[in-house]
Structures are given as C-alpha cells and as structure tokens.
Amino acid sequence: MVQKIKSARILVIDDDLGVRESLKMILMDKYYVSTASHVDEAINSLKIVEPEMIFLDIKMPKISGMDFLRQMHSENSTIPIIMITAFPSSQTAITAFRSGAFDYIIKPFDPSEIHTVVERALQHRVESMEKDKLVSNTRSTVHKNFFSTTESLLLAIDAKDSYTAGHSKRVSLLFGLITKELGMSEAQIVKLRYGAFLHDIGKIGVRDDILTKAGYLTEEEFFLMKRHPEIGYNILEPINFLKESLPIVHNHHEWYNGEGYPDGLKGVEIPQEVAIFSIIDAYDALTTDRHYRKKYSNQEAFKIITEGIGTQFTPTLTEKVLSIIKKCYETGQLVENK
C-alpha cells in the first residue's frame, strides 16, 4: 500500500526563472516549494528548507548540475533528486542514474507526469529511511549483543587475572578522552575504542600460571605471553565492524625503536592510534598493582614513560599524551587509582 505524503518540502534548482516558476505552479497546491537559481543559493536553501526531494537542472552556471548531484548523493543519499533536461539522450540518463539521480524529466513539462514522479520519489524516500532505520537498529542490537558477549569473555579473563578487565575499561575511557583532545573525530574515536577495550582479549589463550605469576616471567613464559596480541587479533578479525580497531589489538606492544612485538614495527610504521594507545596502556599498567610489584605514583609513571621516549614511545606524541592525562586529573575527568 502506497503511503500518502502530505506537505513535503521540495527544492527546485534551475537558472531559468521560467522553469522554476512553472514547477512551482504545478506543485504548490500539494507541496511546499522553494527555488534556487544557482548552486550557491541552493546550498543555503538546503540548510533552511531541509527539502525532502530536489529538482535539479543538468546545465547550471559555475557548477554543473551533474557535479552537484554527485556531491549531494555522497552527503545525503536519502534525498531523491530528479534531474531536469531539455536535451534528452541515453548517455545523459545513464550518467545521471550512475551519479545517484532518482529519475529525470524533460522540458517542457507534463503536469501529470511531474506529480507521478514526485509521488514515487517521496514514497521511495520514506521506504529508504525506514530501511536505514531498520538497518541501524539491527546494527545497534548486534553491537550490544557482541559487547555483552565480549564483556563476559573479559570477565572470564578477570577470573584468571584480576588486573585485566578493570585495565581494559580504564584505558578505553582514557583513549577516548585523549584522542578527542587531540582532535580525532567522534566517529573515529568510537570505532577505535573497541580496540582499546578489547586489546587484551587474547589473554584468554594464555595459561593461568603465567598471567598470575608473582615474579618475573622466564624466557619461555614471556614467549607464550607475547602470543596474546595475535590470539586477540585472530579472535576479532572475522568481525567486520572491528576492522579499523584491529591494529590496536595486534600491535599495542610495538616499540618506536622496532624492538616490540609481534611484528617489530618501527617509527612511522606504527599507526598513530596504536602509538597513542601504547602510551596509555603503559601508563595504566605502571599505576596499577601487578602480581610482581606495587603500583607507581603518577609522577613516577610520567618519569618512566618520559625516559622511554625514542625507544619505546613515539617522540612527537608522548609529551602531548602525558599532558592531556595530567589535565584529565586536574579537571576531575579521571581519579587516581587508590
């Protein structure tokens, strides 16, 4: 059953006043119609009118209608765009559809055809938005279920090593605060925080006696412990939405001088988000009680990390990250571990 669309907002973009007024006269009894004579005016109208569909002339001054179509489609594919042309050709139609047009109409206009096209376009928009909402809700449910499962895994590790689960939550929070301060986009932070939260998930594959050993590890034990980044990567790699966060899981023990593991990455080979996280990971480890030592104070941890600049930690990032950590404590965003 076709859903009836009432009072939809339509934007007509054409440099020909006659075309703009003609379409406005045809549509104004049923819809709110705004017009623009060029692309710059249209951009302003988009912010004010928030149209639910657009008529766009192919031949426009300065920026062609086809170029503007591609730009609009990349920014908001839910708004159906109907191209206007006085010179129809199969190649024009093919190019328009490939660029994201919903349909195209030919001058001079047939009023009944215009109304039919508009109704189809608006109905298509409603259906597309409903589909997008369903996909978004499904994705949200999948993410919630996934993190419920992975938190259970972390609790299982916590049963083996009480340090790990609390550590994962703390470094994930701190990573979000620091990367935001460094200017990373919110969308990117959300994706990468998955890696911060799950970076030690591979410890599920490490023996209990190694995780909880009170003294320093033997060479053989350390070799087995060093496998946890690869184990974690193998656990998470099949999950598509975690793809961007996997380098944090796989490479958070790399050193700036190339002496880290598992890949021996060096300098700029280490992705920036991994270099940032490595500092955070080390800071939290230093300021937390471990099986083999008591925690260091914040000042002691800052000193140890600073001494590691150029060997373990990236010179261009370390002081920035440490200064943001200090700021987080000063502003009350973080509370020192007791």
Image: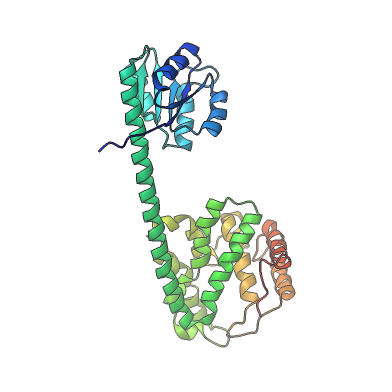
Protein image colouring: rainbow
Classify 304 as above or below 324. Answer: below
Identify the residue at image location x=36%, y=22%: 104
Classify 91 as above or below 181. Answer: above
Q: Is residue 120 left or right of residue 197?
A: left
Which residue is nearer to you in this view: 291 or 86?
86
Residue lying at the far left of the rendered structure: 1
Residue 307 seen anywhere in this rendered image of the structure: yes
Residue 326 in picture, x, y percent from top left? 72, 66
Residue 273 in picture, x, y percent from top left? 57, 57
Classify 116 as above or below 299. Answer: above
Residue 254 seen anywhere in this rendered image of the structure: no
Residue 259 in picture, x, y percent from top left? 59, 66
Identify the residue at image location x=33%, y=25%: 117
Q: Look at the image and tell me in which quarter the C terminus lies.
A: bottom right
Q: Is residue 107 left or right of residue 65?
A: left
Which residue is nearer to you in this view: 4 or 288?
4
Identify the residue at image location x=53%, y=64%: 196
Q: Quadrant of residue 277?
A: bottom right
Residue 253 in picture, x, y percent from top left? 56, 67
Residue lying at the far front of the rendered structure: 29
Which residue is nearer to you in this view: 150 or 265?
150
Identify the residue at image location x=52%, y=81%: 162
Q: Quadrant of residue 172?
A: bottom right
Classify 213 as above or below 317. Answer: below
Count of residue discs: 0
Q: Look at the image and tell me in which quarter the N terminus lies.
A: top left
